[in-house]
Image (cartoon, helix red, strand yellow):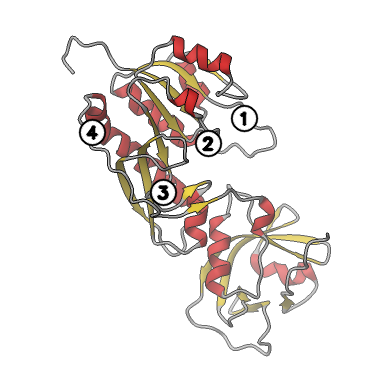
Amino acid sequence: MSAASPAPRAVVFAYHQVGVRCLRVLLAHGVDVALVVTHHDNPSEKIWFESVADLASDYRLPVATPDDPNAPDFVARVQALRPDFFFSFYYRLMLKPALLAVPTRGGYNMHGSLLPSYRGRVPVNWALIHGERETGATLHRMVEKPDAGEIVGQQAVPILPDDTAGEVFAKLTVAAEMTLDRVLPALLAGRAPHTLPEPGAGSYFSGRRPEDGRIDWQQPAAVVHNLIRAVAPPYPGAFFDFADRRVVITRSASQTQVPRGPSACPELFIDDQQLLARCGDGGVLRILALEVDGQALAPTALPARLGQNPVPLLPPLPPIS
């Protein structure tokens, strides 16, 4: 691309923290952002991230928030802008083939895993649930099948044993920014390598609901710990119910030395001024932070609040049909 060439034009579909940081990268590289497509914040959702709409306003970029970006009238509006590229950064709706056919040089998405592993929804949370020690960000071409197009760039980040999803997401945001900043010049110049994943490689996961955070203390300690950190705040949290109280465990850590107790059954108990949880395999976790009925409580105060010490951790009840 010569110095006299017009800047490549893009329509950017973006939301969340990755959307903010990657939009900044496009602007830093001189991309002509003709339209920013984003979402209205959901009033029932905890908004802990920056606003793409506010960033677009700061740079006087036009913004659209369609309920369905694939609606024919919106596709026609985007087509009239004659974009070279689409970029999708944590936009929550799928772009269908008619819309993906609009940009003359293709559409590219930033995904929060090392594709082809963890295609689909909430990849950071799933990676933690499965005890992964690494994840990352991947820029790939958008095709009709989710997260299946050619890979253009990746950046790995470590997952430490006690990292929460929020902490990993912060690393991933930087990884996404680094990936885009590194590969964008070659992509704009038409020289970026595109690598197609092997057919059938990787994995796919669907979305998660708050109810999926219910703790089954009969599971091994490692499984319980991974769930706690995978859904820790700002996500809804891992929880259990005791009598009429909802207890959310917001932080835990592995306990290498397992105290002997009178019971082999799962239980919460105080030992050496710490609240410990014995799980189904006999493994023990340290409970570092928790909430009871939405209010933070010192972990060692929990047995007194629940009126039992130790606190028996019964299997979760089956759902009412």
Q: Position of residue 41 (x, y in %)?
A: 62, 30
Q: Amino acid at mark 1?
A: Asp
* Dot label at residue 192: 4
Front of the two marks 4 and 3: 4
Is 213 displayed left or right of 15 in the figure? right
Q: Earlier in the sequence, mark 1 or mark 4?
A: 1
Whichever of callouts 1 and 3 sits on the residue coming sooner in the sequence is 1
The residue type indicated by label 2 comes to Phe
Disc 2 or 3, which lies upstream in sequence?
Answer: 2
Q: Are circles 4 and 3 on residues that touch, CB within 8 Å?
A: no
For residue 157, side relative to residue 126 (left or right)? left
Pinpoint residue 288: horizontal percent, then vertical percent.
Answer: 57, 64
Instruction: Please say if 83 is above or below 123.
Output: above
Residue that badge 3 annotates: 113
Q: In 3D space, how far apart are the residues under numbered discs 4 and 3 (Cα atoms)?
A: 20 Å
Dot 2, how many residues are within 10 Å of its Cα: few (below 14), some (14-19), or many (20+)?
few
Q: Which residue is mark 1?
A: 41
Closer mark to the observer between disc 4 and disc 2 = 4
Could you tell whether 22 is left or right of 253 in the image? left
Q: Looking at the image, is mark 4 or mark 3 earlier in the sequence? A: 3
Q: Write the residue at 77% across / 66% down.
A: 318
Looking at the rendered structure, the kind of residue marked 3 is: Ser
Residue under the point 35% across and 36% down:
177
Where is residue 108 drawn, in percent x and y? 38, 32
Instruction: Measure the alpha-carbon separation of dots 1 and 4.
Output: 34 Å
Give whichever of discs 2 and 1 has the lower sequence position. Answer: 1
Residue highlighted by disc 2: 49
Which quadrant is the C terminus positioned in? bottom right
